[in-house]
Image (tube, rainbow, N blue to C red):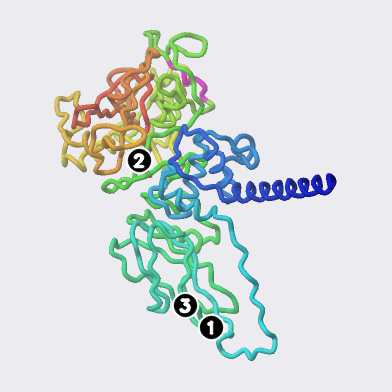
Amino acid sequence: MQTRKKTLISSILLALFIFLAITQAVSAEGFVFNRNLGLGSIGQDVKELQKFLNKNNFLVAVFGSGSTNQETSYFGSLTRAALIKFQQAKKIIPASGFFGPISRKVVNEINKPQETPPKTIIDPTTNLDSEYIPRYSIGGTITGISGPITLQNNKGDDLIITPRDNSIFNFPTKLLDGSDYSVTLGYDELRHQCYFKDNFGRISGSDVTNIKIACGLRLFHNPFEFILNSGTPASAAEQFVCGNNLIDTRDNQGYETVLIGDQCWMAESLNIGTKVTSASSEPACHDVSGANDWSCQVDNNVIEKYCFDNSDANCETDGALYEWAEALSLPYDCNNALTVDNGNGTYSLSCPTSGAKTVQSVQQGICPSGWHVPSFTEYQTLAQNSDPGCDLKCTEGACTCTTAGGELKAKPTNSPISWDGTDIFGFSALPSGRRHFAGAFLNRGAVNFLWTTVPNSVFQGSAWFVSLGTGSLTASGSYSIRTNGFQIRCVKD
């Protein structure tokens, strides 16, 4: 009797163990996300998000922390970059790297435990009439749409696609082998500019999946032109459509972009490079002028950045701060160079140690390929979208861009950092402050300072910048010491 009881108890415990193991396995597969996640978030749900991204080939990291089987519970820039790629693939707008309600819904739907469908058994004696003659689908990929559009095959079979749809499309009606197909654009309220590749032909025994469509409210040129001429795929830069997220392939960080007038701007400040600590002493920093003018971005072989208060978290939310020479990819001693205005948009520098250098009319600097550091004229054009004909140069007594400042600043509802602007263009400037040339950090929460490429040819060691301030609607242009740490907003070539 005692032996039977022991056997029964053992069986019950074994069954309970198996049940719990199965329950845990299902729970791991079907993790449900129920809160917003963003830069700095910590928790098991962050780790589960990293697992989900890695499993679906949106890799957080190739190796080390964040890579497959080494996921962490911290939401940093690598998690954000991988999430942006996922959001772009799923047409989630905005693809900003913030894990909010829309992204959660999509991920939770994908993450549901999959049920195995019942097998369909066909009786081999069944007469197969015309219903079973093979038919093939017509489809491909589409990118860059900002609103709903209608695609048509053979001037019919309407297929409505919205920005939230997956980039892969298939027409609802399948066609018989040997049928002709011709995919064109139907109704398009926003009047996108769209380019097509491989969009017509004849079915030959398989589904058509290679149609490519690239659209945009403003495409810089045909992204398929290079493919057709050389047979080599166009680069990501060549296919870029303003308004889409830009992925900087140097570190896989993502940046929102915005079309303002005829200019395509980053809608976030640049944040690339190795962080260095701001100080006012040797040997890590050098006084470039001998007048308490300290540069700490002194390694000319790598991109270096300051983070406000030397805190990584401030670079994540605000963007980084750069000395003028660093921003233009010039040796650090050029911060104190004598300057000659060549009168054609270029400037000649006489750098104390590194010698003669030239600032080009379009200077890439530390911006990604296809982008460049803005000139003063390009910022003036930006401001004139608000104040036609206004003058940014407050040092010359004009300073007439009296509404642009308010319209370029982020809104009070902006997250995670807010400001007091209207942000009608989507430029979303933040009050990120500055690194003072003597080493201190100042003005965070009050001012946004933005470098231009233009050096001041009258006052040695200074360069032109643009600033926006709390409580002010004015956008101001002036010049200051080049070893100040200001922000960079890249603009498209």
Residue at the spot x=27%, y=32% of the render? Answer: 419
Percent coordinates x, y for residue 347 in the rendering: 35, 29
Percent coordinates x, y for residue 249 in the rendering: 51, 42
Residue at the spot x=26%, y=40% of the render? Answer: 423
- Find residue 267 and name its label: 2
Instruction: Give the residue number, with chain letter if any, for mark 3.
Output: 173
Q: Which of the marked residues, 2 or 3, is nearer the chain's N terminus?
A: 3
Residue at the spot x=44%, y=13% of the render? Answer: 279
The three-letter code of the residue at mark 3 reads Thr
Q: Does the segment drawn in magenta span residue 297?
A: yes
| For residue 78, side relative to residue 24 (left or right) | left
Percent coordinates x, y for residue 213 in the rendering: 44, 63
Vertical order, 152 against 444 (above or below) = below
Q: Looking at the image, is mark 2 or mark 3 nearer the viewer? A: 3
Residue neighbourhood size for the residue with mark 1, other residues' Cα within 10 Å, grouped as few (<14), some (14–19), many (≥20)? some
Q: Main secondary structure of the magenta part?
A: loop
Q: Residues in magenta? A: 295-300
Q: Secondary structure at mark 1?
A: strand
- Compute the Cα span from label 1 to label 3: 10 Å
- Compute the Cα span from label 2 to label 1: 48 Å
The three-letter code of the residue at mark 2 reads Ala
Q: Secondary structure at mark 2?
A: loop
Residue 277 or 419: which is nearer the viewer?
419
The three-letter code of the residue at mark 1 reads Leu
Residue 19 or 101: which is nearer the viewer?
19
Residue 385 or 434: which is nearer the viewer?
434
